[in-house]
Image (cartoon, rainbow, N blue to C red):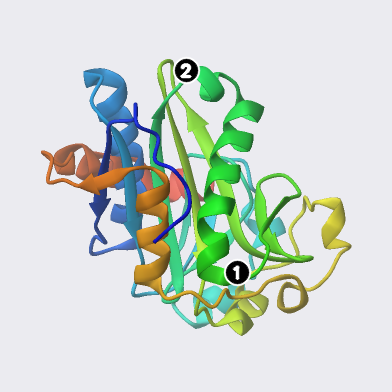
Amino acid sequence: MYAIPPIVSMRMKLIDLTLDSPASNLAFDEALLDESEERESSEYLRTWESPEYFVVLGSSNGIHEEVNHDACRADAIPILRRHSGGGTVLQGPGCLSYCLILRMEGECSTITGTNSFVLERIRRALEPVVGQQVQVRGFTDLTIGSVKFSGNSQRRRLRHLMFHGTILNDFDLDRIERYLKLPSKQPSYRQNRAHREFLTNISGQPESIKGALAAAWNATIHAPALPLQRMRSLVRERYDSSEWIYRL
């Protein structure tokens, strides 16, 4: 169905799992990375989609520079901070999230090499689903023409890395205008456009997008021993911690 050949040497396991809170979903990605780093386990592709809206700051984003805090408070929108870089985003229904855990070898030995390798593979995977040309633009964006539908970031350990991102396919874009300010750092192609002018949804259905990603990474359904205890510890120590969230 999808034209991209599998990576035959890759031992990729597929986890399609949405947990019961935004903090748990963010912490699970980090827990997967930690488990892979410690145990030299298989590489992973995880997909998930939150049923509730929440704001996520990148690890070095300032909350008052990036977020309309009063609007979030008025509408009871949680604000969290992830442990990877990149910009501040709003996630929720219609925003498919994915996470790759990869070994830091070959094309993934460097930050720039990883960006090129992963984004090119995802770009090629999504084009048949979208039915239009997909481009890699800016820092780590996927676009149709000059409008963005996917933002991505990575976190690196000694031997493994996490590359994760979001794909807008049926998202309420007006909410982004309400809860997020214009980002403090912008790629040049954005040209200071408002969120509603800069962002778009793609036409693919979630199952088609997930199928394309799984085919691109040769990922198969697997039920590993999930790192749930580690995830719960990370939620307590970091993702539910005001100290962590409001540290900048």
What x and y, as percent, mark residue 236? 27, 45
Residue at figure coordinates x 80%, y 51% from the top left: 187
Q: Which mark is residue 119?
A: none
Residue 142 position (above or below residue 120): below
How many labels were placed on the picture? 2
Amino acid at dot 1:
His
Residue 48 position (above or below residue 218): below
Give SS at disc 2: loop
Give SS at disc 1: helix
Q: Nearer the viewer, mark 1 or mark 2?
A: 2
Amino acid at dot 2:
Glu
* Residue 125 horizontal side relative to residue 119, left or right: left
Name the one closer to the observer, 58 or 72. 58
Residue at figure coordinates x 41%, y 58% from the top left: 212
* Residue labelled with disc 1: 69
Residue 241 appears in the rendering: no
Q: Which mark is residue 105?
A: 2
Name the one closer to the observer, 79 or 136. 136
Image quadrant where one finds the N terminus: bottom left
Residue at figure coordinates x 60%, y 80% from the top left: 173
Image quadrant where one finds the C terminus: top right
* Cα gap from disc 1 to disc 2, whole angstroms: 41 Å
What x and y, as percent, mark residue 66? 68, 59
